[in-house]
Image: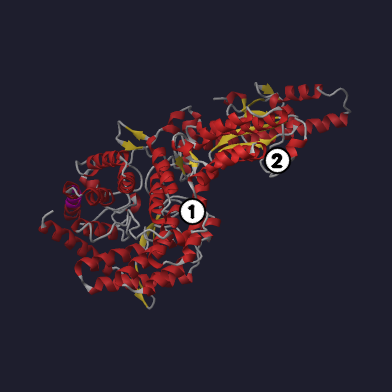
Amino acid sequence: MNQDEGKQFIAEAVRIGDEILSRAIVDEHGMRWKTMSMDEKRNVEWTEGTGIYSGNSGIALFFMELYNMTGKEEYLDAAKRCLQWVVYFCRKEETEYYSFFTGRMGVAYALMRMGQFLKDDLYLEQALEIVRDSGSFLDGQFNVDDLIGGKAGSALGLAHLHAATGESWLLELLDRFIVHLVKTANPGPSGYYWDRSHSHISGLCGFSHGAAGIGFVFLELGRYLGNDAFYWLAEQAFLYETNFFDLEKKNWLDLRKGIYNDEDLDKHSKAYRNGDFGFFKDAGNMNAWCHGAAGIGLSRLRAWELLHDQRYTREAKLAIERTIMTDVEGDRDIEMSSFILCHGGGGNADLFLEAYRTYGDESYWELATKVGERGLLYRQNFKKYISGYRDAGNNEDTSFFMGNAGIGHFYLRLADPYKVQSVLLPRLTAEPVSAGATSGYCGIRMTLAGMKKILLERYFKRTMMAVEELLPEEAQAYFADAKDIEAVRPEDSFVRFAQKGYSRLKGKRRLLLEDILGLEKKKWQLDLQQESHSLLYIQDEIRIKDAEKLLTLEFEQLKEVKLVVAPDVQIESTRWDWNKNKSDYFPGNLEVEPDDFPILIKPVPMEVAEENLSAFSEAVLMEFQQPAAVGDVYSEVLGAFEELTDEEQELLRQKIVEQVRAALNSGILIKASCVC
């Protein structure tokens, strides 16, 4: 880049900064801006927020860097007064939302950055004040683990704050977040992912909401905390994403199948009723920081930097190739070009800038410069920038990720990518913490063997208890060693170990271990076979809706209806009672003789559900394994009893109808004509 280009980019950042300043709201509490956001019905509205993504902390970060590049005091003053208002607001309004980019952890990060920039401990003290109660995020209503709005981002923020302050209580919080993230990992076709959802095909790929972002967090934790087990889990996140790289599209697939409103629900329902099940497996092809190659490439650059594995530089260059196609060679029509950070050219070009920083190859900086030149041309032609909200009309947003503050930050990064740090890839650059400071923290010092055991508990908790009781020495040795999972997934390794274990047992002890392993292995494999979590969700929604009319029928009408057990429902049985709500399987099961314990298993979006059945429930449902009229089933069950009084027959009829209605209401029984 020549000096004139650099001056142009700085000049445009200054123009953006001055325009934002002209829109400031100033009072005794400081300075703030209203920025765009979206309500639950996806309507755009203007609000006063605090976070980095679309709130005032992000604007403060922009003004801090604008001062850093220009030396103009009004920009530093704006950053200070903006953070003054943010602290005021946070003290006034309590929350349990401590995500990194969209919540209070990001506020603390912005305060930390200002404290480091000015060498002023007051900002660091305020940052610590903000996050002191962040542990509530683990126990509250926000069940998300991703980088942008979930617990992984919180863990990253806590590590940043510890690096800046050395406060030991931050390690206590970080320890809890790490344990949570390991416990919530889901095994995929290969690797691990997080955040299962009814509105996704599978766990998402990508940096903001997907496996790449959480993998990045574990890379940073691995380096800063000196724990290679976190490197392994980061690589498992990246391995999961390899399942969804499309060679033709040259991109990692966007696995969202969002249901945000009634129109979306209707679209999904029509696809299901029309038998278009491919709709639920048809992934998107988005390339942005948030979803797709540009963000995923950032994670792979960092993986190459820390792990020096050639596969990560290969994947980073695949991401760069795709982003060149998107943002340099002109896949995007200039009239519709967006240069925001979240899903626009500014964010995508951060991949080029980080590639320049990683490899030292100026051609990557030149690629980013070309995106910046397109941005300047767009502004020259249209006198505005498109915000990140499609329904915002001609209004420009002020925010960091969705509006002009972030575009201004992008131009500053173009002028000097070393002086202006990336916020999109918030690396931990501090020296690793000493081993002595982290001793005693079970999450921070988690070994790979300990991680293996936690991951296995998701599907094999009862089998693990069985092997520890029946094969204590072998189990102790197996769970203390992690060499096996470096070659195969932990679940495969454990199944082989348990099978080998029960082959050495005899009598009831062998049957016990075989019994529970058979059930849990079946559930694990059934879960891996599911091709779309959103399909499971819509399927159940439609079944329940279709059952509404049947649930209103009196017996005389209902008995003519033919029903069948839904094809995805399986009725299994075990020889001992392994009710998942019990905790005392041993020695209890060792002391009783085998019997028959029927169990219903059914895949749902979040898991394979398991329900213990009574003998009567099993008998009723088994009659519906093939299509059968309710009245015929009643007659069959009635015939199993030798003599019943009229009153007993009526009670039996009521009980059968109750079972049928409950099964209809939960999607276990469906109308025979609805079998797909």
Residues packed near mark 1 inside 10 Å, few (<14), some (14 to 19) or many (20 plus)? some
Residue 369 horizontal/vertical position (percent)? 18, 51
Observer able to see residue 184: no
Residue 667 horizontal/vertical position (percent)? 61, 34
Apparent side of residue 2 relative to residue 212 in the rendered image (left or right)? left
Q: Mark 1 points at which residue?
A: 445
Q: What element carries label 1?
A: loop
Apparent side of residue 280 relative to residue 430 in the rendered image (left or right)? right
Q: Name the residue under label 2.
A: 585
Query: Which residue is at the front of the view, 119 or 131?
Result: 119
Query: Which residue is at the front of the view, 353 or 358?
Result: 358
Apparent side of residue 651 relative to residue 181 in the rendered image (left or right)? right
Asked whether residue 530 is drawn in magenta, I would say no
38 relative to 270, above or below:
below
Q: Give the range drawn in magenta.
A: 367-373
Three-letter amino acid code at disc 2? Tyr
